[in-house]
Amino acid sequence: MQNPIYTEVTSCRDCYKCVRSCPVKAIQIKDGHAMIIKDRCIYCGKCVHVCPNSAKKVRDDKDRVKLAISSGRKVICSLAPSYASEFRGYEKELLAALKKLGFAGISETAIGAALVSQALDIYASEHDGKAPFIGTACPSVVELVRKYYPDDVDKLAPVPSPLQTHSAYLRHIYNEDFAIAFIGPCIAKKMEADTTPGYPDFAITFHELRSWLDEEGIKLDEIEAEDVDFIPAKAGTSTIYPIEGGQIATSKLWGGKQFGTEALSFSGIDQVMSALTGETFPLPFLELLACEGGCINGPATDDKVSMAARKRAATDYTAKRLDEPALFTGDEEFAKLLLEKGYGILHTPSPKAESGVRGKHSEDEIKRALVELGKLTKADELNCGGCGYNTCRDMAIAYIEGMAEVEMCVTKMRKEAESKVDVLLRTIPTGVVIVNSDLQIADCNVRFLELFGDMEEGFVDQNILQMVKDLPLERFVPFADKFRDQFYLTHPGQYRVHFKDKYLRVTFFLVESKRLLGAMFEDITNPTIRRETVVKKAEDVIQKSLETVQQIASLLGENAAETEIMLNSLIDAFSVHGAGDGESDFREDANGDLA
């Protein structure tokens, strides 16, 4: 099955924004394209959110759910409690819409959350109020621990996530065949559906649900609201789970304490990684959520709505239901079974540490990689972050592991480009100048200054070239105004000019449209002198022909006239009309061939 997050290669460009945003650098750059490495990914969805070209895609599973419904199979919706913040003011309309889509029943994922809290309360009460675990409510956090903090895997809570627990509970109380489809803000839930089939069977995001509603022509502001009964009951306090600290708030042992010391909450992957770094245990229970602020800020939520509005909607929805009768308060028998069996209740083993995700490399290997990246000294390690990695050393390690390419190093590529330009300008036999839109010199070579700066050969060095930069072009070239028009031409022209005692061919070229323009000056004086000799001889022939005409007009009159016309054309073709010393005269060279 396709990875829950993948790259649309044709839309991926060399921006490295996904690498920069990925907290675990699970993205490999290959042939300039960013590919997600499944064995490293934690499915947090950050790359999807930041991709400017929408090249990072989330696998669309709604057709699988639709197929299950259309096949006649009973499908129960496990609805994430954050639906209250996502569909603010349309909660009842959404439930009616879900029934219209064909779901046989709607159950709140928060039921599973209540059972997880109950199981951990039982454990804590049996161990002096302590449960030194890392919460498993967030699948991205579980993947993070498995792959990047393998020494802490045994500290993960011994119970599955609320979604997995909810799925197991539904199968526990309903003795019949049905499928479970989760709907919520989380991409990582798709990974849970893939790795623990049936717990749930499918997982679709709020984005996919909106797309599905659009396809069916269902509009929440037009559909009639209905009172839909949740199965097996309506969840209570546990609907606060999607907010940071929500799991702790549902605990009978830890909730409500102003200064909690036995349970701490952190959200946002940076805070989570900080909480796991260094000395972590013995510590209290850690409620860790990959998304800042909690699941209400998941990668598949409506980010056009402020976090404040979403948090208020979620808390209001929970507060309003607390006085309602027949709320789900837990199932102690099942909670004990959950605690006893752990992941065995899903017929799957507990999460295992993933070895080899982070390679170990010797200092010599890293130094060799740094050299290949153009980092010859410590001063070369600018740590600019242009490649997407925080430091040049991190980039070198990624390069060793085949996750990065040399071309990702912006400073190296810039230096190479500058070096190639410098070599080209230094060795090319023609004069070259590059100017900006203000007609200031951005770069030039020695030959240009020898032609226009009255400098003798061998006198110009690199120091003088640096001094010339940013000076007005008109200080050197009397026809500087001719450059301005070339900036706005799709194909800048080629001209010939007589400057002082030289004949030059001028070829303009765009370096950067409307910003940088280059001109190449080729000295064609010697060929021109040869042509002037031809012209002189042609004039002599004409004079002799005219004398012949006068002497034997009756014999050669017509032929002599044709000869005169031909030779005059030859003169025009070979003449380069110039001005006096120190001036110039531009003439367009249509064929670009003056030799």
Image: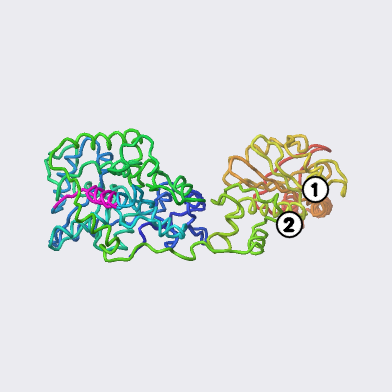
Q: Nearer the viewer, residue 538 or 202?
A: 202
Q: Is residue 163 left or right of residue 270?
A: left
Q: In the shown orientation, is residue 494 left or right of residue 17?
A: right
Residue at x 35% of width, y 41% of height: 245
Q: Which mark is on residue 254?
A: none
Q: Which residue is mark 1?
A: 446
Distance from Cα at disc 1 to Cα at disc 2: 53 Å
**Three-letter code for the amino acid on which mark 1 is drawn:** Val
Q: Which residues fall within the magenta stretch? A: 105-122
Instruction: Using a 10 Å C-alpha cutoff, classify the residue at mark 2 as few (fewer than 14 neighbours), some (14 to 19) or many (20 or more).
Output: few
Badge number at residue 559: 2
| Residue 115 among those drawn in magenta | yes
Using the rendered image of the protein, determine whether residue 283 is visible from the camera's viewpoint: yes
Count of numbered marks? 2
User: Is-magenta flag for residue 404?
Assistant: no
Q: Is residue 271 above or below residue 136?
A: above
Front-most of residues 77 and 460: 77
